[in-house]
Amino acid sequence: MAKSNLSDAILVNNYISGDENSLALLIDRHQSRIYGYIFSKVSDRDLTEDIFQETFFKVIHTLKTKKYYNEEGKFLSWVLRIASNLIIDKYRNDKKMPLKRDTEEFSIFSNIKDSSLDIEKRLIKNQVDIDLKMIIQKLPHDQKEVIMMRYYSDMSFKEIADVTGVSVNTTLGRMRYAITNLRKVIEKNKIYLPS
């Protein structure tokens, strides 16, 4: 069996046993999800790079010292929880939450821009994305978190539950409340959302 076909659990065990290449395979396998998750929280490329590297320093240290890693085949969820804790620490140290900025790479509920849109429609769509992001920022933290993980990082509800340390039902409930609150604000402010 090729190394790239090995499960996360086997690669972790191989790395702990001294096979450095196994960690490289794990990083390659999950890099885009982890990077995307961090970027969805901080909206800054340099800070994302720093937190991504720091996350893997912690992963390496934990695996090398064989501490705190409970092998249940949930490597990605474990790494995302480490990243999440580092992000929270960063916010606590800075005493502020960053405002999400609109970028070419990220749009709130889609990552693909329709190139057939004419300029006027594109301007409207960009403004809607900005308005939606501002509304999301005003949601309670737990609701905002589940929206960002689900739509920015394309995480499943199970993965979100693992990262946030709550049940899947609680995660679904938070999403339901978030969507309800978004609808109320959109209706109250008569915000136009083109289909």
Image: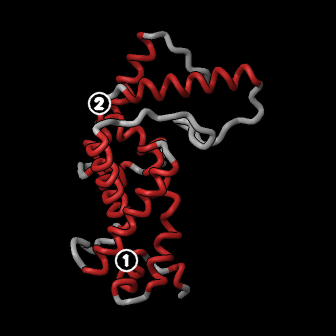
Q: Quadrant of the C terminus?
A: top right
10 Å neighbourhood of mark 2: few (<14), some, or many (≥20)?
few
Residue linked to disc 2: 140
Q: CA distance from mark 1 to mark 2?
A: 35 Å
Q: Quadrant of residue 163?
A: bottom left
Q: Residue at x 53, y 88 (%)?
A: 1
Quadrant position of residue 80: bottom left
> In the drawing, what numbered circle is on residue 151?
none
Left or right, residue 5 beside residue 88 = right
Describe residue 155's horizontal placement relative to residue 58 as left or right: right
How far across and down, in percent of the image, does residue 187 sit? Answer: 44, 13
Position of residue 195 relative to residue 145, above or below, is above
Q: What secondary structure is marked by label 2? A: loop
Q: Amino acid at mark 1?
A: Ala
x and y percentages locating residue 102 in the rendered image: 55, 34
Task: Bin the neighbour count of mark 1 within 10 Å (Cα to Cα): few under 14, some 14-19, many 20 and up.
Answer: some
